[in-house]
Amino acid sequence: MALENKLGLISSADLAREEERISKKKAITLFETGMLDKLESGKFSSLKAIHKYLFEDIYDFAGQIRKVNLAKGNFRFAPLMYLEAALQNIDKMPQSTFDEIIEKYVEMNIAHPFREGNGRSMRIWLDCILKKEIGKVVDWSKVDKEDYLLAMERSPIRDIEIKHILKEALTDKVNCRDVYMKGIDHSYYYEGYSTFKAEEL
């Protein structure tokens, strides 16, 4: 069964297709209108704005902190009771170097603040920080999906792998739409609909 949505779709596959189509279209608008450049880099408020814009036509919960506990495989994302405190701490984390930025990205992934669409929103958010702080972005077409997934799974304990993978994929083509869109194009490599478990409160 699909997540409850504004499109009235009950098939997960149909929802995935429509979600990809709509979020890609919205992501292009975010990029082309310069809206991303107006957001404060590295803040949860900016991630929230990105998520709301991408998914507001699909979900009522767009831009809203999740109300369920989430797990993927054996990994449990931040429990609801600690989520707001975790987001406040992430806001305060430094982001002046590549290592600091990726450490912040890893912590936001552990927080996983939204019910759905975290990966796509966070990759745009990450690129906004990298662009502002070090003048580079990730070319996601150079990131092997299996290596990325394994590195992200291990990142809460050991972040050296994800740092290496993303550093190798950095580019200074910060204003290239094609490079930017690779983070959205790759979304279904990284976000499997059947792999998330949610516990309703």
Image (cartoon, rainbow, N blue to C red):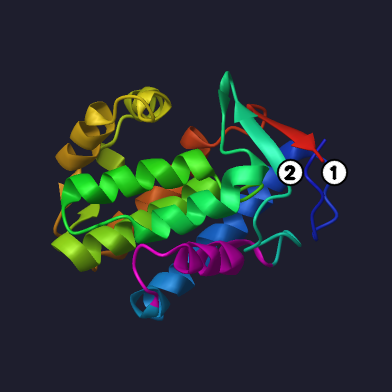
Q: Eyeballing the image, is 172 above or below 170? A: below
State the quadrant of the C terminus.
Answer: top right
Say what amino acid the circle numbered 2 marks. Answer: Asp
Q: Position of residue 180 (x, y in %)?
A: 33, 58
In the image, what residue occupies the spot 49% across and 68% down? 45
Marks 2 & 1, CB-CB < 8 Å contact: yes
Q: What residue span does the magenta drawing correspond to?
A: 39-56
The 10 Å Cα crowd at callout 1, few under 14, some 14 to 19, many 20 or more, is few
Left-right relation of 177 to 20 = left
Determine the CA span between mark 2 and mark 1. 8 Å
| Residue located beneath label 1 in the image | 10
Magenta highlight on residue 154: no
Q: Eyeballing the image, is 170 above or below 12? A: below
Q: Position of residue 128 (x, y in %)?
A: 32, 63
Q: Position of residue 144 (x, y in %)?
A: 31, 29
State the quadrant of the N terminus.
Answer: top right
| Residue located beneath label 2 in the image | 14
Residue 173 in view (yes/no): no
Residue 109 in view (yes/no): yes
Corner quadrant of residue 163: top left
- Overall secondary structure of the magenta section: helix
Q: Eyeballing the image, is 169 above or below 127? A: above
Left-right relation of 4 to 184 = right
The 10 Å Cα crowd at callout 2, few under 14, some 14 to 19, many 20 or more, is few
In the image, what residue occupies the spot 35% across and 62% down? 42
In the image, what residue occupies the spot 85% across and 43% down? 10
Q: Which mark is residue 75?
A: none
**29 or 42, nearer to the observer:** 42
Corner quadrant of residue 60: bottom right
Corner quadrant of residue 75: top right
